Image (cartoon, grey):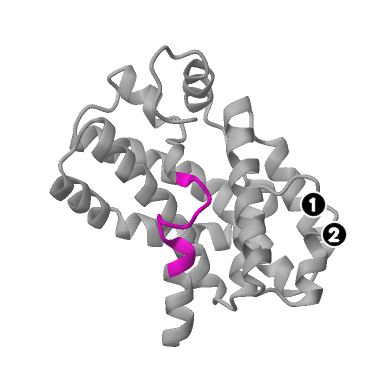
């Protein structure tokens, strides 16, 4: 991978990307509140299971969106974007992906890195979920698809680890140890996402959905999901 493209990927996957990812825990705060996640071992189990869910649904959709943007296929982009939004089964999860998607898409526009044909694809969308905005940004920055998918997965896992470091709490060394141990799982999830057929996509995770709904009325909250 060329050094220029690697640097672009690092910037896109960085936790300092100004889209507000650090304000969301994706259900993790509820799991911590209930004691399901309480130490390094339980944190690893939670994140590993979350990664399985992502590998069966969000990551395959990102992969399809990367291919669709590369082909400038507006119909496919709209189909998979709407498909993903429709599958957000709680108000928090839906608001999360729309808010961060809007912020990332606006950032790409402000940076003026997308060509005219690419920019036109999202011009008339009222809602842009995060997977769509991420694929849009990756294509605008000419990041190879496989690397972009790995970067997306790493970013999601890193955000979960950081939430554990702050809220379980875990020490910084424990957090880095946990993140390093998840590298093989991230690689496996990326490969799985590229091979999954359309009819095999699934975001079935009723326990996570219930935690998300409970989080909406949780008395003490730091995160928005």
Report the residue marked by disc 2: 75
Residue in the image at 42% along x and 46% along y:
51
The secondary structure that dominates the magenta segment is loop
Residue extending farthest front: 110
Instruction: Give the answer, above or below, for where 47 lies relative to 69.
Output: above
Asked if the residue at tag 2 contacts the one at tag 1, i.e. Cβ–Cβ closer than 8 Å, the answer is yes
Q: Quadrant of residue 38?
A: top left
Q: Secondary structure at mark 1?
A: helix
Residue 49 relative to residue 171: left or right: right
Question: Nearest the camera: 125 or 49?
Answer: 125
Q: Residues within 10 Å of mark 1 (few under 14, many from 20)?
A: few
The image quarter containing residue 185 is: bottom left
Picture residue at 53% right of the left edge, 25% below the top: 209
Q: Residue visible at 39% across and 62% down?
A: 187
Q: CA distance from mark 1 to mark 2?
A: 6 Å
Using the image, determine if residue 219 lies above or below residue 69. above
Is residue 24 positioned above or below 206 on the image?
Answer: below
In the picture of the structure, the residue carrying the numbered disc 1 is: 79
Spot the residue most to the bottom: 2
In magenta, the rendered stretch is 11-21
The percent position of residue 112, horizontal first and vertical second, equals 67, 73
**Is 14 inside the magenta-drawn segment?**
yes
């Amino acid at each position: 991978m060329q050094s220029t493209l690697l640097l672009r990927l690092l910037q896109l996957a960085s936790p300092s990307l100004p889209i507000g990812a650090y304000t969301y825990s994706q259900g993790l705060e509820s799991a911590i509140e209930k004691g399901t996640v309480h130490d390094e071992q339980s944190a690893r189990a939670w994140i590993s299971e979350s990664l399985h869910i992502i590998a069966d649904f969000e990551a395959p959709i990102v992969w399809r969106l990367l291919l669709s943007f590369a082909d400038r296929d507006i119909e496919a982009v709209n189909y998979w974007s709407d498909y993903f939004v429709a599958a957000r089964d709680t108000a928090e999860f839906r608001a999360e992906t729309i808010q961060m998607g809007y912020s990332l898409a606006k950032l790409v526009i402000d940076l003026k890195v997308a060509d005219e044909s690419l920019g036109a694809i999202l011009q008339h969308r009222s809602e842009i979920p995060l997977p769509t905005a991420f694929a849009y940004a990756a294509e605008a920055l000419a990041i190879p698809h496989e690397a972009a998918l790995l970067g997306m997965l790493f970013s999601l896992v890193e955000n979960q680890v950081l939430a554990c470091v702050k809220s379980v709490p875990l020490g910084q060394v424990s957090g880095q140890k946990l993140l390093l141990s998840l590298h093989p799982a991230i690689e496996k999830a990326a490969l799985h996402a590229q091979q999954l057929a359309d009819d095999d996509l699934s975001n079935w995770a009723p326990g996570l959905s219930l935690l998300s709904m409970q989080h909406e009325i949780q008395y003490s909250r730091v995160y928005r999901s």
